[in-house]
Image (cartoon, helix red, strand yellow):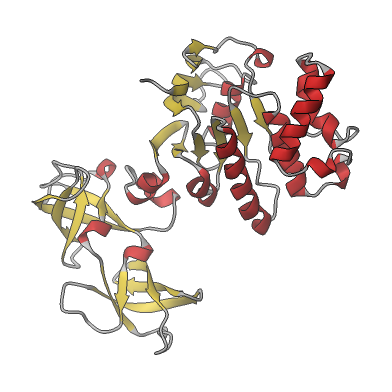
Amino acid sequence: MNTSKLSIIDLTKRYAPGLDPAVDCLSMSVQEGHLVALLGPSGCGKTTTLRMVAGLMDPTAGSIMVDGKDITQTPVHQRGMGMVFQSYALFPHMDVAQNVAFGLQMRKVGAKEQARRVTEALDLVKLGHLASRRVKELSGGQQQRIAIARALVVEPTLLLLDEPLSNLDAKLRETMRTEIRSIQQRTGATTLFVTHDQDEALDMADRIAVMNAGIIEQYGPPSEVYERPQTHFVADFIGQANFFSAAVLSDDGAATDGERSYTVDVEGFGRFGAVGASGLAGSTHEIVVRPHRLKAVLRQPAGTAIEGVIERVSYTGDSLSLGVRAGEKELLAQMPTSSSGIPQIGEKAYLSWDAADAFIIPGTAQGGTQ
């Protein structure tokens, strides 16, 4: 059964003839009840996509479907969507309850029903006790929750959030992303969330659409996007990463989840294991190893390892982050802290990884092996 709440089909936005499109033939589907993050750098087209879904901007081409109905030409006020802007856009001359009730008034909802729904919405965001406060008397986090209550009170077909955490300090951002996720899960509101912050996307989303130059480079669950990036851009944009050019020498059989195990020759450092899609043997690709998957030891191990010299050490409490120089590469690794002390700059380190922790990026073919 198709449970897609939102379907975007070949959506394109070109601001002027001759310019590269801000959004280029973008297609994606959002399941009912999911929170989907549009993640990418500034100028990648994520906010433009959100504004077209909201009806605040007309697409150049393509279509937008909600519950199987084409709403591409439907005016913004008839789409029934709730939107939270980066600036929250609350009315300073109104109190909290009046701000939340505004959308209901525009829809000519009766006074008794308005009062009931405003009370429920404020209780949902745990701010019922502030109903009579003025906006200027609220903290940033409180203003954000009021903006969410105002968006939810109209029982929207979709909840659209445009970087709502960017104006908050770091500690409050962490608290509020937990709050937003909790509210979204309790209400079951299908949500599109625009952010440039990878931690927000990984923490909050059911699915992440990683955008770059107007296209979606990868769309999937957070763990898949992080652990199994399909392009160099995705691997580099989300989290820290070590990249190697690797000649894929042999297919060593099935791994897990439909992947294959391979032996790869890594830039003259030796032969290691890696996993990837089928059919990669005989070609050269990039492989990615996340720093927390790159094992660092100070004594040469029995197996194959990359020898390097420690150039940077960062102590984070339960682990150490190391910058290790190996030839012309600086590699990032992590190792647990121990009572024996902290490694010193200038010491040798030996780096290796388990085969399952090195992923062959499919979108990086560089030709045949030598």
Residue at the image point whose x is 65% and y is 21% from the top: 56
Q: Is residue 266 left or right of residue 175?
A: left
Of all residues shown, which one is farthest toward the bottom? 340
- Rendering quarter of residue 300: bottom left
Residue at the image point whose x is 60% and y is 29% from the top: 159
Q: Quadrant of the N terminus?
A: top left
User: Can I make out residue 20 in this image?
Assistant: no
Residue at the image point whose x is 89% and y is 32% from the top: 94
Q: Nearer the viewer, residue 73 or 105?
A: 105
Of all residues shown, which one is farthest toward the right? 93
Q: Nearer the viewer, residue 313 or 138?
A: 138
Q: Is residue 46 left or right of residue 153?
A: left
Residue at the image point whose x is 38% and y is 84% from the top: 346
Q: Residue 279: image x %, image y %?
A: 13, 41
Is 346 rendered above or below residue 357? Answer: below
Q: Nearer the viewer, residue 8 or 15?
A: 8
Q: Residue 277: image x %, image y %?
A: 20, 43
- Rendering quarter of residue 154: top right
Is 332 rendered above or below residue 59? Answer: below
Label total for image: 0
Is 6 rendered above or below residue 166? Answer: above
Q: Is residue 138 left or right of residue 303?
A: right
User: Can I make out residue 61 in this image?
Assistant: yes
Q: Residue 23: image x %, image y %?
A: 49, 26
Q: Residue 339: image x %, image y %?
A: 42, 88
